[in-house]
Amino acid sequence: MKITSLLLFILISFQLQAQEITTTLVEKTPFNLERFVGVDKFNNFYGITNNTLYKLEGAKKYQFADLQLGEISSVDLLNPLKITIFYRNTNTAVIVDNRLNEISRINFTTIQNFRNVSFATTGKDRSLWIYNIDLQQLELFNYHTLKVISHTQPINNEVTAQQSNYNFCWLQQEQKLEYYNSYGSFMGAINLPVEFEFSEYNNLIVGKSKANWYFLRKNEMKLQSISVSENAVKDFYLNNENLYLYTDNFIYNYQLNLSNE
């Protein structure tokens, strides 16, 4: 019995180790803004200081600020030519171009059929994924026609985080993560550890709890462990298979080693 138990322990340990995804440090970049937002597909860095969004493009620096809108709640870099900045306190989303010049502004309080919105992220074409608090549903909203393209059924739990790409949107609720397609259809869900945060890119997700890091693929819907050496991470961002961690006034760029899974 002791030998059998030992073999079982070794087998389980081997399986857990095989599931762990390793990382390789690629580079370390100084970064002196208060908040790290992310890195776009052209390798430009974004951050926030004094409620002003900055884009660092080599030696060039662009900025956008409208202090009357309150605190910046989120910035979506999915489309670097149409970046979505959301201000939850004033129920407003602003779309800016690659030089952070304003393209469009949507105040959900003043439009016809107004709605209270807790999250707004980039969708396809001229659309935003928005979470409508009043109806408790996710909506794909065309900000040019000011009409809802599609929506989900009402969601019973409080939504605490939202991230999206052109075709899918992820909603975190208490200790689970659900995702929906652009037709408003529920596609799947997974249970989460407590104090979970996540970053999504092209249906890949990296998340962290208080002490551990995880990786998730949309088509597998199971959490895998990631080996990350940095502690006290303030912000993190996933771009392709690169994980960017902001800590100690530096951005650490780690390559996820996914090819040998």
Image (spheres, grey):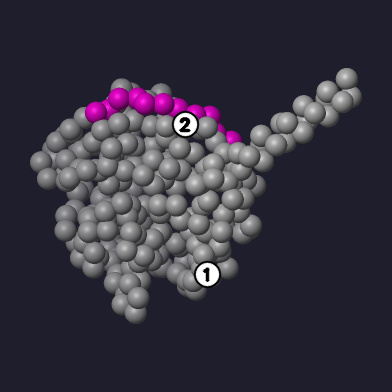
Residue at 39 percent across and 47 percent down: it is 201
Number of marks in the rendered image? 2
Across and down, in percent, residue 26 comes to 52, 65
107 relative position to 46: left or right = left
Above or below residue 177? Residue 27 is below
**Tag shown at residue 28:** 1
Which segment did they paint magenta?
Answer: 183-193
106 relative position to 213: left or right = left
**Tag shown at residue 220:** 2
Q: Which residue type does callout 2 highlight?
A: Glu
Q: Which residue type does callout 1 highlight?
A: Lys
Does 238 appear in magenta?
A: no
Above or below residue 189? Residue 249 is below
Across and down, in percent, residue 142 comes to 16, 40
Q: Secondary structure at mark 2?
A: loop
Q: Residue furthest left?
A: 145
Mark 2 is surrounded, within 10 Å at the Cα level, by few (under 14), some (14 to 19) or many (20 or more) other residues, namely few
Could you say which is closer to the camera, residue 8 or residue 245?
8
